[in-house]
Amino acid sequence: MTTGSGGRHTPARLAALFAKLIKIEHTIFALPFAYVGAFLAVDGIPSAHDLVWVTVAMAGARSLAMALNRLIDAGIDARNPRTAGREIPSGLLSPVAVTLFCIASLVIFLVAAWQLDPLVRWLWPIPVVAFVVYPYLKRFTWLCHLWLGAVDGLAPVGGWVAVKGTLPWQAWALGGAVALWVSGFDLFYALFDVEIDREQGLHSWAVRFGERGAFWGARLMHLATVFLLVLAGLGLSVGIAYWLGVVAVAALLAYEHSLVRPGDLKRLDAAFFTMNGVISVAFFGWVLVDALA
């Protein structure tokens, strides 16, 4: 298949390129929280049918979101030395190929949505519109991080409504917790590109408030994350395992913040990638234990 710069790739190579394009390994950030929403919605274990289709819907939605981001930001990425080697700027994948991938991901998401609670069939445009809007926001506002957080915060809300067909305040509290968690670590992530963003006239929290402002913003958001997890737990019939999960999230966030500080970003990769995967899996693990108890 011809994908970019006139090149041809084997199916295996093509699959690897698309997996890298969407950073498939980072699905670990969002998928566990979709399961958290589903498990807490039914106060137990959802049906195998629901779990399978929630997984497929999340995979389709996240693939669509990441591919759209890469497609819309291809020009910006090409001008940034850190991102110029990504699949579209480097010519490994063509915009046409990525557009077709977006369409396929949307179809997968919609097929999965139609297997879940009927309410999902009315709500599916919300995340899709959010996916399209997000990449453009950095061109206009430093609040783009909060939009990204809100998009990822739909994971537990979506998991809840997919199996229960309702949207109580507890689901929104879980969504808010995830939204602020993601927004907070995205403030860290933006520190990679502060200078190039300034040069290109792009907006971020770090460009607007500086490195120290990004750290304080992340700290406050992550404190609010823990608060909202506590609030959600108080409104649910949860056991000790859930509360141990909240304690684990608080401890891991504190450790994440200990890895980096203003003027010392050497371990930023570890704080962003490794610890956030650990946090999402650990919290879901405790919710699973609670559901099995």
Image (tube, grey):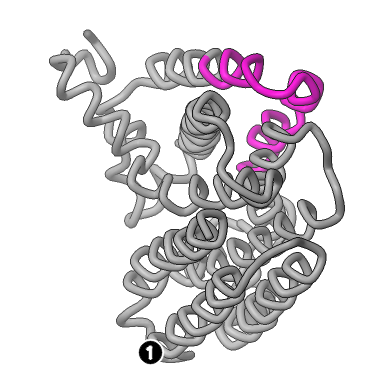
Q: Quadrant of residue 128?
A: top right
Spot occupied by residue 3 in the image (x, y as percentages of width and height) = 28, 16
Question: Quadrant location of the N terminus?
Answer: top left
Q: Estimate how packed mark 1 is, as few (under 14), some (14 to 19) or many (20 or more) residues with alpha carbons within 10 Å.
A: few
- Name the residue located 48 percent from the left edge and 27 percent from the top edge: 52
- Name the residue located 67 percent from the left edge and 50 percent from the top edge: 43
- Name the residue located 79 percent from the left edge and 54 percent from the top edge: 172
Q: Which residues are magenta?
A: 108-135
Nearer to us in this view, 165 or 106: 165
Q: Is residue 237 above or below residue 57?
A: below
Q: Is residue 90 above or below residue 223?
A: above
What kind of element bears circle 1?
loop
Spot occupied by residue 133 in the image (x, y as percentages of width and height) = 70, 37
- Name the residue located 75 percent from the left edge and 19 percent from the top edge: 121
Q: Is residue 270 located in the magenta-colored stretch of the structure? A: no
Q: How many marks?
A: 1
Q: Is residue 115 located in the magenta-colored stretch of the structure? A: yes
Nearer to us in this view, 148 or 194: 148
Left/right placement of residue 210 relative to residue 18 reads right
Q: Is residue 15 visible?
A: yes
Left/right placement of residue 175 relative to residue 167 reads left
Q: Residue furthest front?
A: 293
Left/right placement of residue 234 relative to residue 42 reads right
**What's the amino acid at mark 1?**
Asp
